[in-house]
Amino acid sequence: MAQSIAKEFTKGLWEEIPPFRLVLGLCPTLAVTKSVDTAIGMGVGLTFVLVCSNMIISLLRKIIPDKVRIACYIVVIAAFVTVVELVMQAFTYPLYLKLGIFIPLIVVNCIVLGRAEAFAGKNPVLPSIADGLGMGIGYTLSLTALAAIRECFGAGTLLGTPVFGPWFHPFTFMVQAPGAFVCLGLMLCIMNIIGSK
Amino acid sequence: MREMISMVVVLTVLSAVSGGMLAGVRMGTKTRIENQVLKFQKAPAIKAILKNVTNDPLKDRFNIKDKNQEVTFFLGKHDGKPTDIAFETHGQGHEGPIGLMVGIDINSDKIVGVRVTTTTETPGMGTRANGDSPFAAQFAGKPLTTVFKVKTDGGSIDVMSGATVTSRGICVAATEAKDIYMRLKPEIKKKIAKM
C-alpha cells in the first residue's frame, strides 16, 4: 500500500510530469513563466486545487452518478479555485495582480480535470491525494525551471535580482510569447532525449 | 427515474455545499482583501494625484452615503489646511468596469488629477490610459464646469486612438466624480470641518 502511494506520487515528478510528458495545461505554462515568482505562485495554487479536488472527488466517487460526473467535478474544482483566488487576493495581492485571469482559468486546466477523470474518479482517497500532490509538485517544478531559464536570459534577473553584470543585454525574445514556445520545445526535446536512453 | 433523482440531488447538494464554503471564505477574507486593494491599488493612485500634500490621505479618510452606495473620500492637507480630496468612481470600458481615482481641489473646484486604478482593458490599447499617461494628464487643472466628453462626442478630451471605448469610459467616470462631488459638497465640507 505505502509502496503504491509512493509510486503514484513519484510518477508526477518524472514519468508523467504534466507539461512535458502529458503535454497538458500548456496555456498557463506559456503565460505565467515570464518570471519565477509568478510560476511558483501558479504552481502552488494549482497544487492546492489538485490535491483538494482529487481528495473530494475520490471520496465522492461512489455517490456521483456517472452521467453528471463532469459537472460534479467542475463544481468541486471551481469551488477550490475560487478559494485560491480569494486567499491570494487577501494575502499576496501583488502576485494576484500579476497572475490575473490565469487563476480563475485553473478551473478549465486540463491537468485538474484530467486527473479527476483519469485517476481520482476511480481510485481510493490516499492514492488520489498522492497523485494530486505529485502532479502538482511536478507542474510547479516544470514551471519554475522554464521560468528560471526565461527570466534569466530574457530579463537578466532571477526572482527580481540581477544575475549578470551590467554588461548583459537582456534577450527580450525569451520573455515574449514566441520565446515561451521555443523554450518549452527545447525542454521537451531534452527530456525526450534523456528519457529515451 | 431513480437515476434521474440521484443526479439532481447529488449535483444540487454539491453546488449548495460549495456555495456555502465559498461564502464562508469570502466573509473571512473580505476585510483583508479591501485593505490589500487599498494598499496596492488605491494608495499609489492617491499618492500620485495628491502629491503636494503633507499628511497621509489614506489615514484621513471618511465615508459619505450617496444614494445607495458609500463613497470613501481621501483628504489631502497642506500644512494642516485641507486642500484636496480624492475618491474613486467607475466607468464602463471595453472589457469591463474601469476604476478611476479622481482628485479635486476643494478650494478652486478644479481637477487635480485622475488615475486609473482597476482595469481589464486590452494590454497595449486601453491600458495606455494607465499610470502617468498623456490621456489622464488632460484632466488635470480642468475646472469642474468642463464637460468631460471626448472630442468626437462634442467634449474637450482627446481620444486615445484605437481605444475610443476606454476613453469614453474614463470620461464617464470623471463626469460621475463631478456629479458626486457637486451633490455631496455641503456634506464633504461638514465632514472636513470636523476633522
Image: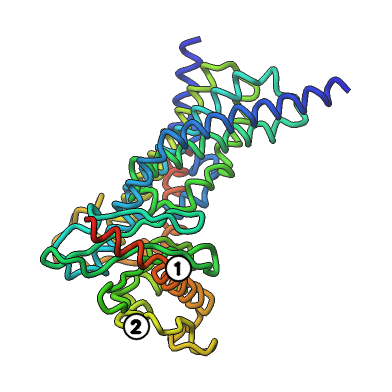
- Residue B51 in view in this figure: yes
Q: Position of residue B186 (x, y in %)?
A: 35, 66
| Observer-nearest of B91 and A176 | B91
On residue A37, which mark appears? none
Q: Position of residue A26 (x, y in %)?
A: 52, 49
Kindly report the distance in space between the C-alpha atoms of the residues bearing marks 2 and 1: 31 Å
Q: Position of residue B5 (x, y in %)?
A: 81, 24
**Residue at x 34% of width, y 40% of height:** A91
Q: Which residue is mark 1?
A: B123
**Residue at x 60% of width, y 27% of height:** B17
- Residue A185 in view in this figure: no
Q: Give the amino acid type for the residue marked by disc 1 in the picture.
A: Pro
Classify A8 as above or below B134: above
Q: Give the amino acid type for the residue marked by disc 2 in the picture.
A: Pro
Q: Which residue is mark 2?
A: B143
**Residue at x 39% of width, y 41% of height:** A88
